[in-house]
Image (spheres, rainbow, N blue to C red):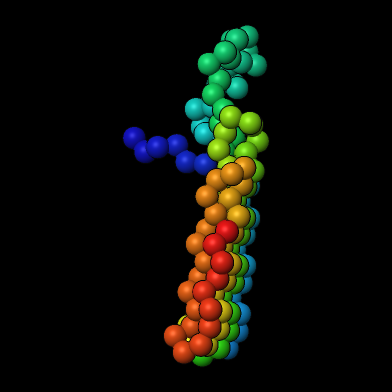
Amino acid sequence: MAAAGPVGPGAGGDAGNGNLIGVGGQGGSGGWRERLADRSRRFWRRRGNSGASLRAGFAGGSGGNGGAGGLFYGDGGAGGNGGMSAQAASPGGNGGNGGNAQLIGNGGKGGTGGDGAPGGAGGTGGLLYGVPGAAG
């Protein structure tokens, strides 16, 4: 049986890439997500069960990755920020990675992690010219 995936808002979407000349888009920010088992526990708690075993299930979703810069020229997009958790005991989401530049351009900045979770890596600078993006 497959593991239960996110329920409710989850990971932020990845951004689009620049075409020939253009800047990559910024990754979407993560929301919160709820484990299916915890949703089931809430269902039974509303029907008289104590729900004492309810675990924190509102972890933050990961941020989306930034888009790559244009093939000839353009900076990579910034990574999306990780989502904050909806409960104190749940982990925050990881930041998305910054987009990479192609030939000329700077790498995108990595997204910040939510609630102290790891941030995303910065994107690489262009092959001919450019600096790497900062980590989130």
Q: Taking 51 as reference, is 96 above or below it?
A: below
In front: 37, or 129?
129
In front: 106, or 62?
106
**Which residue shows up at 57% across the image and 59% down it?**
136
- The N terminus - image quarter: top left
Q: Taking 24 as reference, is 90 above or below it?
A: above
Tell which residue pokes out farthest to the left in this image. Answer: 1
Residue 99: x %, y % from top left:
52, 71
**Residue 117 quadrant:** top right
Q: Can I make out residue 70 in this image?
A: no
Residue 93: x %, y % from top left:
56, 46
**Relative to 97, 42 lies left or right:** right
Residue 31: x %, y % from top left:
63, 47
**Which residue shows up at 51% across the image and 32% down it?**
36
In front: 68, or 121?
121
**Which residue shows up at 53% across the image and 83% down it?**
130
Q: Taking 60 as reference, is 76 above or below it?
A: below
**Residue 52 quadrant:** top right
So how many labels did they put on this image?
0
Residue 28: x %, y % from top left:
62, 59
In front: 126, or 51?
126
Q: Taking 128 as reference, is 46 above or below it?
A: above
**Which residue shows up at 53% across the image and 16% down it?**
53
Q: Can I make out residue 26 in this image?
A: yes
